[in-house]
């Protein structure tokens, strides 16, 4: 049960990192759930549709597909805020509903596993699965440690780089950031 809790916490770590970056910049990203849905659908698509790759290429490619899916889904409300002034809370909440319905449609339509009555994707290729540390039924895998590494990368970015300082400054005191030309 403890290791399964760590497996279940992995997507929440990634979602929390995305939300934390937005909060530090003074933007409320309530769309983490929708970004997880779309990112998971994109990673699953890459994981089952691309065949014949070795794991050393397929795993990072699947992770990149998931990251790009979530990034694109999060970009839409950011673009709407920047170009039209639309409020990010309202836009991200609406995007969550769209992502839920879109992933539901994908899993009951184009991405549905052949011969299945449940809304599940086709089986991911073994070359796209993260390595497990134990035999089945324990699912603890490398993803937890990737999430911890990304938490350190976000910490490093926010507190050790100029861009991170600029982001925190604009988020904490927007007028000071504007005065400083950030």
Image: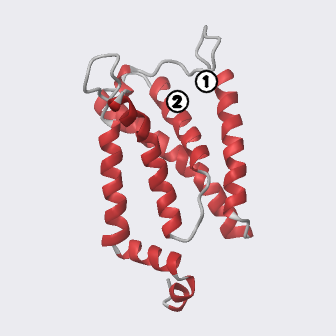
Q: Identify the residue under disc 1.
A: 111
- The x, y position of residue 116, in whole percent, is 61, 10
Residue, x 63% and y 25% (percent of image)? Answer: 107
- The x, y position of residue 51, in whole percent, is 42, 22
Q: Secondary structure at mark 1?
A: loop
* Vertical arrangement, residue 96 with respect to residue 151, above or below: above
Q: Is residue 178 left or right of residue 99?
A: left
Q: Is residue 52 left or right of residue 86?
A: left
Nearer the N terminus, badge 2 or badge 1? 2
Q: Identify the residue under disc 2.
A: 45
Near mark 1 (Cα within 10 A), the count class, few <14, some 14-19 or many ≥20, is: many
- The x, y position of residue 69, in whole percent, is 54, 44
* Vertical arrangement, residue 82 with respect to residue 103, above or below: below
Return the mark for residue 94.
Answer: none
Where residue 161 sits, quadrant-wise, is: bottom left
* Vertical arrangement, residue 176 with respect to residue 100, above or below: below
Check if mark 2's residue and mark 1's residue have beta carbons within 8 Å.
Answer: yes
In depth, the one of 34 and 64 nearer the eye is: 34
Where residue 5 sits, quadrant-wise, is: top left
Residue, x 58% and y 45% (percent of image)? Answer: 33
In depth, the one of 100 and 59 nearer the eye is: 100
For the N terminus, the quadrant is top left
């Amino acid at each position: 049960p403890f290791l399964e809790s760590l497996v279940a916490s992995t997507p929440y770590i990634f979602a929390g990192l995305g939300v934390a970056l937005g909060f530090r910049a003074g933007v409320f990203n309530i769309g983490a759930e929708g970004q997880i849905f779309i990112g998971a659908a994109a990673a699953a698509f890459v994981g089952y549709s691309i065949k014949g790759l070795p794991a050393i290429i397929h795993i990072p490619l699947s992770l990149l597909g998931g990251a790009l899916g979530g990034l694109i889904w999060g970009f839409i409300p950011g673009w709407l805020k920047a170009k039209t002034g639309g409020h990010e809370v309202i836009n991200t909440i609406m995007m969550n509903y769209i992502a839920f319905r879109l992933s539901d449609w994908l899993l009951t339509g184009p991405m549905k596993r052949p011969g299945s009555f449940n809304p599940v994707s086709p089986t991911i290729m073994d070359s796209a699965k993260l390595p497990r540390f134990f035999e089945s039924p324990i699912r603890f895998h490398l993803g937890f440690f990737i999430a911890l590494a990304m938490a350190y990368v976000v910490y490093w970015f926010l507190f050790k780089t100029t861009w991170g300082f600029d982001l925190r400054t604009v988020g904490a005191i927007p007028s000071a950031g504007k005065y400083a030309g950030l």
